[in-house]
Each structure stands twice: as structure tokens, then as C-alpha cells.
Amino acid sequence: MNRRTALKLGGAALAAAALRPSPARAEADEGTVLQELWRRERAAELAYDRVLYADPILAVLRSHEEDHALAVATTLAAVGLNPPRAPEEPADLDAASRRLAEAGPERRAVLAAAVALEEDLVAIYSSALPSFVDEKIAMTAATILGSHAQHLFILREVT
């Protein structure tokens, strides 16, 4: 390799390193993202609680949201963070979760709101995944993303 090629490669490596977040910043960003994911899982859990009467599948999905929140809480603890305050009523929920919580009483409206919530969760996890530097955190998020995609498929089948 000649000097010019070495300098070009070295410059490219430096540029790539400059674009990569520092480990300290990546961890802080991961923690913030994880706290938001935890909050969204708890919001989805609360929303499903409010509409369990509409279809038996909603109880299954609600239990999955609880499992997701637990997995994210475990990951938060592993990075030394606590979950934020849990949502307690519909006013505390994000728009997609609130729409589901307030969808009743018609089954079709509830299921449409559940589809919209799961679409939102798939989008949120899809956009969060690239921000994870730690492979274990990325694997947890990817697994939960897959679960939400499965929820979406199931809900579309029952509507």
C-alpha cells in the first residue's frame, strides 16, 4: 500500500470514528431510549387492560406488554437506571395507547385501535434499534420488535 492510499484509508477511519457516538454518550442515549420504551410498554399494558372485554386475544397481548416492560426494566437495571414513573390513567398515555384505552365499546373500534397501537410500537422499536450500541440491549429490543410485529399480524387476522 502506498502512502496516499494509507492516508485516504486513515482519513476514512477517522471520519467514521468521529460520526460514531462516544461510549459515554451512547450509554446515556441508550438509557433514555430504554426509559421511553419501558414507558410505552407500560402504557400499552394499561390500554389493553381497559379493553379486555372486546376480544379474548387482547388479554394475551396485554400479558406480552407486561413481559416486554419487565424485559426493558431488567435491561435498564443492567445499565444502572430506573424506569420512569409508570402511567396510571389514560391522560398519562401516549396518543396511540390512549386511543386504544378510550376505543370502546364496539369490538371493531377496539381492534382497529389495537392495530394502530401495534403499528406505532413496531415503528418506535424500528427507529430505536439503530441507537443501541450494546449487543444485548439491541437483541432485547429486536426480540420485542418481533413480538409487536407478531401482535400486528394476529390482530389483522382477527379483524
Image (cartoon, rainbow, N blue to C red):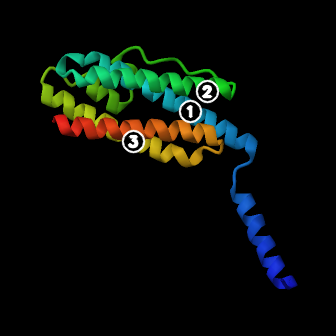
Q: Which residue matches tag 2? A: 76
Q: Residues within 10 Å of mark 2 (few under 14, many from 20)?
A: many
Q: Which residue matches tag 3? A: 122
- Locate residue 68, reporting x and y percent: 46, 27
Give the amino acid type for the residue marked by disc 1 in the picture: Leu
Give the amino acid type for the residue marked by disc 3 in the picture: Val
Is 142 left or right of 134, judged from the image as shown?
left
Is 115 left or right of 134, judged from the image as shown?
left
Of callouts 1 and 3, the N-terminal one = 1
Of callouts 2 and 1, the N-terminal one = 1
Residue at point 12% right, 24% down? Answer: 106
Q: For numbered disc 2, what is the local secondary structure? A: helix
Is 136 left or right of 158, judged from the image as shown?
right
Residues at marks 2 and 1 touching, judged by CB atoms closer than 8 Å: yes
Between 61 and 16, the one lying in front of the other is 61
Q: Which residue matches tag 1? A: 34
Between 76 and 32, the one lying in front of the other is 76
In the picture as drawn, the residue positioned furthest to the right comes out as: 3
In three-dimensional space, the C-alpha distance between marks 1 and 3, rounded to whole angstroms, equals: 15 Å
In three-dimensional space, the C-alpha distance between marks 3 and 2, rounded to whole angstroms, equals: 20 Å
Give the amino acid type for the residue marked by disc 2 in the picture: Leu
Residue at point 28% right, 37% down? Answer: 116
User: Hey, which quadrant is residue 28 in on the image?
Assistant: top right
In the image, which disc is placed on residue 63?
none
Q: For numbered disc 3, what is the local secondary structure? A: helix
Position of the C terminus, as image quadrant, is: top left
Residues at marks 1 and 3 touching, judged by CB atoms closer than 8 Å: no
User: Hey, which quadrant is residue 82 in on the image?
Assistant: top right
- Locate residue 70, reporting x and y percent: 51, 21
